[in-house]
Image (cartoon, grey):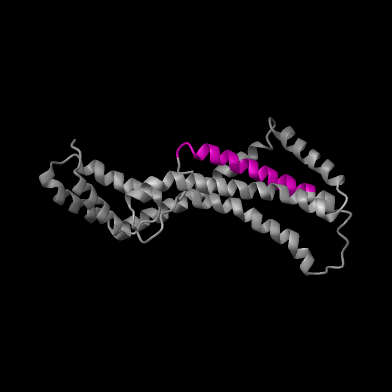
Amino acid sequence: MRQLTQSEFKEVQRVIFHKEISSAEVLSEIYDHYVSHLQEFPEEKFSLQLLELEQKFTFAYCHALQAKFNKSMREDISKTQWLVLRKYFCTSRWIYAAGILALLFYIANQTQSEKEVGILILSPLILLTIVWFAFNWRVAKKIKPIKRTFKGMAIPIYSSTATPFSERIYLPVLLGQVLIYFPRLFDFGIDFNPILPGVAAVITAVLTLYLLSLLEVWKIKSKTALL
């Protein structure tokens, strides 16, 4: 196995560059495959072996790989979070979940105004927003070497694993805003005040468990993925 020359690295980057792959994971995997394969051959066979790789890793083939990988990552993140959430309701953790709910019900019943109820609901949403910023900063830091390798690529490079995870962070924030502002847009003629503390406690508990599950998924996946 030999070390590729600087010009050979540039040539590999050039041909992969034109495949317009936006997934950092797929891009890195294909690049590593090209390099490791070409290192097994002498310099005079570089062009021939690169051509053979190009015949296999066509534009369509690479984008099919990317689509398949993106789909698998979405399913994997969803499955992992569901498994984590289920653990909170297992025998060993149900007291933990029940304790959170009881505490939130107590706090909600102490609220004196709609503003205080709103603050209660907003607290996990604010934490989700903070997590979202921290998460994106961490991901940007992790994929920076890949972006540097393919600097000048017209298509933005993103993490296929991070995208569905990021969506799961900000979706509850958007839904929370709808829950807060939607009743104000329409007058349903219903007095929600008697049930407002209980509803707020349930929503806050759900959002809190959701946030904790996301943090646990992040911890699990960050060991092997660009998270």
Residue 57 appears in view: no
The quadrant holding residue 157 is bottom left
Question: Of all residues shown, which one is farthest toward the top?
Answer: 92
The answer to whether residue 199 is left or right of residue 178 is right
**Image height of 126 relative to 92, above or below:** below
Name the residue rendered at 69%, 44% in the picture: 208
Secondary structure character of the magenta stretch overall: helix
Q: Residue at x 51, y 47 (%)?
A: 137
In what quadrant of the picture does the N terminus appear?
Answer: top left
Against 103, is 124 above or below?
A: below
Is 205 within the magenta? yes
Q: What x and y, as percent, mark residue 13?
A: 27, 52
Which residue is found at the position 54% from the left and 37% from the top?
219
At x 54% / y 41%, what residue is drawn? 218
Range drawn in magenta: 201-224
Residue 50 magenta-drawn? no
Residue 49 at what x, y percent from top left?
Answer: 17, 48
Q: Where residue 217 sits: x, y (%)?
A: 56, 41
Residue 117 visible in the displayed image: yes
Number of residue marks: 0
Residue 66 image point, x, y percent: 39, 54
Q: Is residue 103 left or right of residue 46?
A: right
